[in-house]
Image: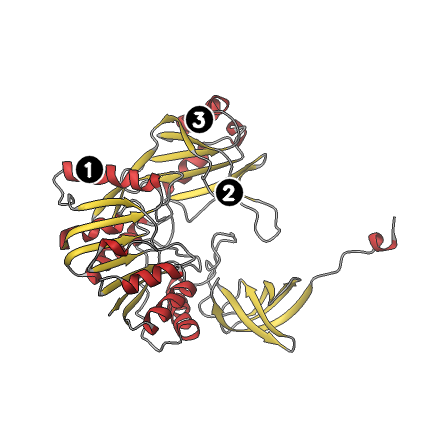
């Protein structure tokens, strides 16, 4: 054995730190003689002991002891999915407003009022979707920051319909699946599941039957892929999707397709976005997916175009609209179009609504929005940093920022949604 190999591993550095504020990601910002430290599990005004993790860039640390606690601190679950669960809910709403305000000031370089955060109707058990590793010890949260998977004993964020099925599952019966995803409906109480693993559907027949016996109304199979669910999904048994209510519309949601995880909170944001859009001849919903937002615009515009690049989402949206029209709803003016958000200007529009992925609006999309006939842009975002970058760019192009309101889709976490409007 070499001398280097015989040396014991270095002990992590432990620092006593005073937390100045929270920054994006729910991290407490502290400073010492060597610069900034970002501390997980700490709150503004606290004095903590924290272990520092070695690595490049700004030092990262994890709280191991709270020496002086904030009045906002509460007992919360020690889960990787609840990085703000140790703060009271009222404090979480304040922090999230501050995240948006800071992004506007620091990134967009704008002084502008940010409204109070609209709370989620439910603080716990709001998530209609969950994805876990299948391990010999049980279902587990995915590995995070070098830690081993954490077996799920209880998940207080997911809807109780999912928790009920998890309680009935024997993970050993899910082989050869390596992961499993669930989607629940608050509207119907039903749950669909997707097994994730390599192989043909017949190899997963036993696992599928076990899930159906546990209460799932449908089971699908997704092959492992670098990009989530990009290798295709096949139905094994029962239903592929369930119906869910988002604001004023019902949509079909599956265990593998994209949909907002908190239907009640998302519905409030969609209704407000429709109010901000106003009325007119033609509205375009970019990155529109299955059209949950675009369909909210239908009563106030002669026609609505939902643009997206996902064939699966567009197909679901067309089917949802057909069923809605058959039920007598006034959505016959909604059409779906396969396309790139950066190449839509030929459509002509009065109002554009965007709800892009976390990366925000690509430059081409911003150019086309600016060169379009639209005089109003309703911008919904799940990332304050990219939203602020885009808003700053549009303001420099001559647009004026109006209402900015954070909406909390993700209680107990540091994530925040933003509903905003810009006018020519």
Residue 204 screen position, x and y as percent: 48, 25
Residue shown at 35% from the left, 32% from the top:
240
**Point 42% across, 40% down: residue:** 163
Report x, y in % for residue 8: 80, 56
Residue under pointer 3: 208
In the rendered image, which residue does mark 2 sit on? Answer: 153
| Position above or below: 287 against 113 | above
Query: Between tags 1 and 2, which lies in front?
Result: 1
Q: Which mark is residue 322?
A: 1
Foreground pick, 403 / 352? 352
**Earlier sequence position, callout 2 versus callout 3:** 2
Which percent across, then down, holds residue 93?
A: 37, 65
Number of residues whose C-alpha sits closer than 10 Å to that of mark 2, classed few (under 14), some (14–19) or many (20 or more): few
Instruction: Please tell me in which quadrant of the rendered image residue 100 appears.
Output: bottom left
Horizontal side of residue 151 vs 91, given as left or right: right
Residue 215 visible (yes or no):
no
Element type at mark 2: loop
Q: Between residues 411 and 227, which one lies in front from this camera angle?
A: 227
Q: Is residue 312 visible?
A: yes
Q: Residue furthest front?
A: 346
């Amino acid at each position: 054995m070499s001398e280097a190999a015989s040396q014991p591993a270095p002990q992590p550095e432990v620092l006593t730190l005073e937390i100045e504020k929270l920054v994006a990601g729910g991290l407490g910002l502290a400073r010492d003689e060597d610069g900034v430290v970002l501390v997980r599990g700490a709150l503004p005004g606290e004095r903590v002991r924290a272990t520092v993790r070695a690595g490049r860039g700004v030092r990262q640390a994890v709280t191991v002891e709270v020496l002086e606690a904030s009045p906002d601190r509460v007992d919360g679950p020690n889960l990787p999915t609840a990085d703000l669960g140790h703060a009271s809910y009222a404090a979480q709403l304040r922090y999230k407003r501050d995240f948006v305000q800071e992004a506007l000031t620091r990134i967009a370089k704008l002084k502008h009022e940010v409204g109070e955060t609209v709370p989620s109707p439910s603080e716990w058990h709001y998530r209609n979707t969950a994805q876990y590793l299948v391990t010999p010890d049980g279902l587990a949260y995915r590995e995070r920051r070098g830690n081993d998977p954490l077996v799920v004993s209880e998940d207080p964020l997911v809807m109780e319909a999912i928790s009920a099925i998890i309680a009935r599952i024997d993970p050993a019966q899910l082989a050869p699946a390596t992961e499993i995803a669930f989607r629940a409906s608050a509207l119907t109480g039903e749950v669909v599941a997707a097994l994730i693993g390599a192989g043909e559907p017949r190899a997963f027949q036993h696992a599928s039957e076990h899930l159906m016996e546990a209460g799932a109304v449908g089971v699908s199979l997704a092959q492992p892929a670098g990009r989530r669910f990009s290798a295709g999904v096949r139905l094994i048994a029962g239903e592929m999707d369930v119906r869910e209510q988002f604001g004023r519309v019902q949509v079909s949601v599956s265990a593998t397709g994209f949909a907002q995880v908190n239907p009640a909170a998302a519905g409030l944001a969609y209704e407000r976005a429709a109010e901000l859009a106003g009325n007119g001849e033609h509205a375009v919903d970019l990155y529109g997916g299955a059209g949950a937002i675009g369909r909210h615009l239908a009563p106030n515009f002669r026609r609505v175009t939902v643009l997206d690049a996902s064939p699966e989402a567009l197909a679901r949206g067309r089917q949802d609209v057909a069923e809605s029209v058959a039920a007598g709803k006034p959505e016959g003016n909604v059409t779906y179009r396969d396309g790139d958000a950066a190449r839509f200007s030929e459509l002509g529009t009065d109002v554009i609504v965007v709800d892009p992925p976390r990366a925000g609006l690509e430059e081409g999309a911003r150019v086309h929005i600016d060169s379009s006939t639209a005089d109003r842009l309703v911008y919904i975002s799940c990332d304050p940093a990219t939203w602020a970058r885009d808003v700053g760019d549009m303001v420099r192009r001559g647009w004026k920022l109006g209402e900015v309101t954070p909406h909390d889709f993700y209680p107990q976490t540091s994530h925040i949604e933003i509903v905003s409007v810009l006018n020519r």
